[in-house]
Image (tube, rainbow, N blue to C red):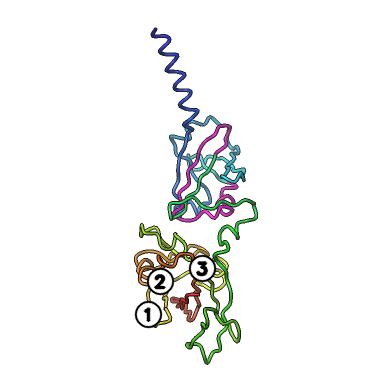
Amino acid sequence: MKKRRREEGSNKDKNFKKINPKKFFKIILPKILQSKTLSIPDAFAKEFNLQLPTNARLTIRTGLSWKIALEQVDNKLCFTKGWANFMEQNAVEYGYFLEFEYQGNKRFKVYIFDLSCSEIDYPTKYDQYAKQKFPQNVKEKVVEDDEDEAEKDIHRGGKVLERNSNRPSFTITVQQSHISIKGKYCYMQFPRGFSSQHMEKSYESIMLQTGDGREWHVACYVYKQLIRLHGKSWRKFMKENHWDEHKGEEYTFVLVDKKSSSVTFKVIKE
């Protein structure tokens, strides 16, 4: 009887492992972005008995997969070569949450969650990074403005004027990540192409102006070519302009003044 119970217990353990694959998670911090490597938790790494270096394969929901080198770095088992490309192709950024599900034979299923705590829209092709990062809801354009009319009406009939001009701008569509009720998770990110061409790396805040003359100093996070408006000042701007009531609608950010340490945008509702 005892022997049978042991056998039944052993079978239950095996079945439990089959339906509960080994997992670990990581929150993407600046150190990970800078080092372009990702360490695997020690407790999880002990499950491996690998001849290093070797390769692992990471797969996302759409079936795309990446070959990533597994190496020992500072006595830690890490994803190294190929990891930076995986992050870029999937638009993984600071604060994102990644869950890794080990499926055996050095293969992992990866689930990616953004700052809204929702899974991202995964790319379906390896060359879709630009479209995935800034899908149809983000577009970049140059707003034209006569110098003598610089501070006059640059917005008529819901359209930004595009003649006699040299004013850079970009247009975004209000999304849940901009207006999250959970507060600390809401943010708005500038298109990378716009940031790299028109912005500096030294800003601590950005001035936002609306057509009725109101102004907000909004905190910004800057990392390489990534610029993100966030924090209490962004929530204040978003709430006082009722963005929670305008989800799905477009706003254009027009660069009206730029100095080495400060920058000002006029925010226009399309």
User: Does 64 appear above or below 212?
Assistant: above
Q: In the rendered image of this protein, does residue 52 appear above or below residue 98?
A: above
Label 1 is placed on what type of residue? Arg
Report which quarter residue 143 is drawn in: bottom right
Name the mark on residue 172: 3
Instruction: Return the residue found at the far bottom.
Output: 148
Name which residue lies at 50% across and 41% down.
Answer: 100
Residue segment shown in magenta: 81-108
Eye-nearest disc, 1 or 2: 1
Question: Circle 1 sits on which residue?
Answer: 214
Q: For the residues marked 3 and 2, what is the alpha-carbon distance in whole angstroms?
A: 19 Å
Residue 205 tag number = 2
Decide whether residue 107 is among the magenta residues: yes
Please state the horizontal and vertical placement of residue 198, each as a whole percent of the image. Answer: 54, 74
Above or below — where is 39 with respect to 185? above
Give the residue type at disc 3.
Answer: Ile
Q: Mark 2 belongs to which amino acid?
A: Ser
